[in-house]
Amino acid sequence: SQTIHQWPATLVQPVGSPLSLECTVEGTSNPNLYWYRQAAGRGLQLLFYSVGIGQISSEVPQNLSASRPQDRQFILSSKKLLLSDSGFYLCALVPRGSPLHFGNGTRLTVT
Amino acid sequence: KNEVEQSPQNLTAQEGEFITINCSYSVGISALHWLQQHPGGGIVSLFMLSSGKKKHGRLIATINIQEKHSSLHITASHPRDSAVYICAATGLDTSGSRLTFGEGTQLTVNP
């Protein structure tokens, strides 16, 4: 069965510090992977999606970047965090024709 | 204008009531998903629909492709059903997996 591992679960970082959130999947190959952000009380905003190694599509211009160094690994990064980067970050696996799978999320607080 | 719109944004019900949450979408889709997000933030998939109706326990999901509309029903609602319910559409892009979310419906079921 397909599973997603996302870490860390919570993170408190100062403004200007770097960020690296990692998402790995099991039980599937060549998955379509997504990073979403949810600000407090708001809906899910698509940040990046990847259909394969090295292939990244950005939905919203921002302070973040993503990379897909391996088939089952998707990384969300920032060189310098802003206060507005605070939120709940979710990695998602969107299999064609199958239910969605989400990681448990990372709650990021930038102070 | 969001491609996926949900209503209502907030819903409060008494235990035992029949609940309906609506979702409308404006683009062609390959599938429509209903998701549940609990206060901890984790998201679970409830249903994936491409046509007709699905039932799981007290939950029923329907979709009308011609009208681009889906509904999630909860029969005999219970306080443990309190959560955010999110509608998401898998789009007809080249990868077949672009996912667009509604803003969510916050459901509170009072005992």
Image (spheres, rainbow, N blue to C red):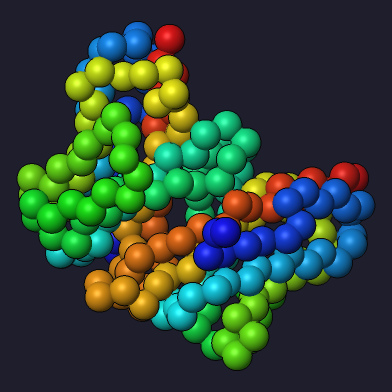
Q: Quadrant of the N terminus of chain B?
A: bottom right
Q: Is residue A41 left or right of residue B49?
A: right
| Viewer-nearest residue: A34 or B60 | A34
Q: Nearer the viewer, residue A70 or A49?
A: A49
In the displayed structure, would residue B79 be above or below residue B17? Answer: above
Q: Quadrant of the C terminus of chain B?
A: top right
Q: Name above or below for residue A12 compared with residue A98.
A: above
Seen at 25% across and 72% down, the residue is: B95
Residue visible at 8% across and 52% down? A54
Q: Residue A89: percent from the left, percent from the top?
A: 40, 37
**In front here: A57 or B54?**
A57
Name the residue at 19% across, 62% down. Answer: A51
* Rendering coords of residue A60 (x, y %): 35, 45
Is B35 on the left-hand or right-hand side of A106? right
Numbered circles on residues, count = 0
> Quick check: can you spot residue B5?
yes
Q: Is residue A104 visible?
A: no
Determine the image quadrant of residue A50. Answer: bottom left
Q: Position of residue A85 (x, y in %)?
A: 40, 26
Residue A104: quarter of image: top left
Residue B17, quarter of the rendered image: bottom right
Coordinates of residue A109 in the picture (x, y in percent): 44, 19
- Is residue B84 shown above or below B91? above
